[in-house]
Amino acid sequence: MKIAVIGTGYVGLVTGTCFANSGNEVICVDIDVDKIDALQQGKIPIFEPGLEQLVSYNLAAERLMFSTDLAKGVSSAEIVFLAVGTPQGEDGTADLSALWTVVNGIAPHLQEAAIVVTKSTVPVGTNARIFAQLEELTGRQCFVASNPEFLKEGAAIEDFEKPDRVVVGVREPSTAEVLRQLYEPYLRTEHPFLVMTPESAEMTKYVANAMLATKISFINEMANLCERMGGDINDVRRGIGHDRRIGFAFLFPGVGYGGSCFPKDVRALTAMAVQNGIEPRMLHAVDQVNQNQKAILLSKIDTHFKNDLSGKTIAVWGLAFKPRTDDIREAPALVLIDHLLANSAQVQVHDPEAMANIRQVYGERIQYCRRHPQALSGADALVIMTEWSDYKRPDWEELKQLMRSPTVFDGRNLYEPERMKERGFCYYSVGRPAV
Ligand SMILES: NC(=O)c1ccc[n+]([C@@H]2O[C@H](COP(=O)([O-])OP(=O)(O)OC[C@H]3O[C@@H](n4cnc5c(N)ncnc54)[C@H](O)[C@@H]3O)[C@@H](O)[C@H]2O)c1
């Protein structure tokens, strides 16, 4: 099939590349000229495991193209995917300005039988509005569908190729059938293809993210209770996870969720609920708990250093909002670094992939270390914000030699408190007793 993907970010690039890889002819369009220039040369603007090789392979096979020319991209496409960003607006609602620019831009170039598929996460009712807008602009009833994306950054290709499910929201069965054929290579091992109304599909995406965010905020609140009342959240987590009604997935305590999706999608759903006269008490709580959790290590650090961080050197391991990505949008590490700088600490950071993005935010106000042990040179404490594998088995003796004081604030519970005590460290984690 001939496909155009509009918006070549995390979702658009993965979508376009994977569809090219299953034999389709794909053109990815973006307004970012530098990004398209780089992609045309096979250079990937983001870090996503396996993506670079897949892009190069499909570029060479001439199934994948990149362009800034919307008209060229859309005019020959049988299916047009919309994958532009829908960031949080000032009032918490999703900002759809990029989406509407694209809808208005594609209308004059659409083939009569083309299907316009929304992959961006959009408020319930947007698909119906796209249908109406295209009808007004083209003078005919166009084919539209909602196809929310559930991939995880860091495992995006695997998620795309082996989806837990594919959800499509359509107005007529024939549109679902075209999309089923497109996804067929990824459904062979009985991955479900779920057909519903566009409104249900749009709602599904928000409900999925709200549920995942709720699990994280729930376990974080329980971790905070454990700390006060003497339990160990890791034991509690295992104690509840074996109950099949609860399970283990997404129940790791930490420093709160970040990224480009959970924070904004929880707030967008909250705004939708309020607009519809419903007080979303759980959603408010999920967001509030998360805001609080992002700062959970700050108070431990302040207490440890008796509210005086000036002249202290703090090492930070992990800057991305999660491992295996360079994405720092709403990352808890940003809250930590802001606090450390505001309190005159010297900050030395390491992240395997996200340092270029962090440098764009902090410039030369912090020190960037190529190897993670270097960040500990002369440090009064180490703070761990992202659970990259690189950090799981450090050489503790080497680190102790490098540090001014052997103190670790572990926001991801990577180590055993008793073992850290034996190694001579003062060790703080989340939901477990400090040692
Ligand atoms: N990132 C994820 O993990 C993820 C997962 C599921 C769903 N989503 C949703 O998918 C959508 C895209 O997210 P993303 O993370 O890929 O965003 P992104 O910011 O990485 O990429 C968006 C791209 O759209 C481009 N763009 C903006 N305006 C444009 C226009 N007028 N014409 C062409 N291109 C334009 C931007 O230049 C950018 O490259 C969002 O709605 C998001 O909520 C994201």
Image (tube, rainbow, N blue to C red):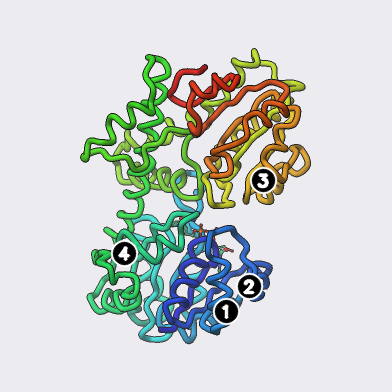
Is residue 145 something one can see in this rendering?
Answer: yes
- Residue depicted at 74% across the width and 21% down the height: 310
Mark toward the start of the polypeptide (2 vs 3): 2
Residue drawn at the location 34% of the way across and 70% of the way down: 186
Marks 2 and 4, the one that precedes in the sequence: 2
Q: CA distance from mark 2 to mark 4?
A: 28 Å
Which circle's residue, 4 or 3, is located before the other in the chain?
4
Front-most of 234 and 419? 419
> Quarter holding the N terminus?
bottom left
Marks 4/3: CA–CA distance: 34 Å
Mark 1: give few (<14), some (14-19) or many (20+) Cα within 10 Å: many
Residue 395 position by quadrant: top right
Left or right position of 152 against 309: left
Identify which amino acid the numbered label 3 is placed on: Ile
Residue 261 % position (x, y): 46, 50
Mark 1 highlights which residue?
59
Residue 100 in sight here: no
Residue 43 picture quarter: bottom right
The answer to whether residue 156 is above or below residue 222 is below
Cβ atoms at labels 2 and 1 below 8 Å apart = yes
Q: Which residue is mark 4?
A: 166
How far apart in space, not on screen, are marks 1 and 3 (Cα)?
30 Å
In the picture of the structure, the residue carrying the numbered disc 2 is 42
- Residue located at (59% from left, 79% from top): 69
Instruction: Compare residues 284 and 421 and report the one nearer the observer.
Output: 421
Tag 1: amino acid: Leu
- Bin the neighbour count of mark 2 within 10 Å (Cα to Cα): few under 14, some 14-19, many 20 and up: some
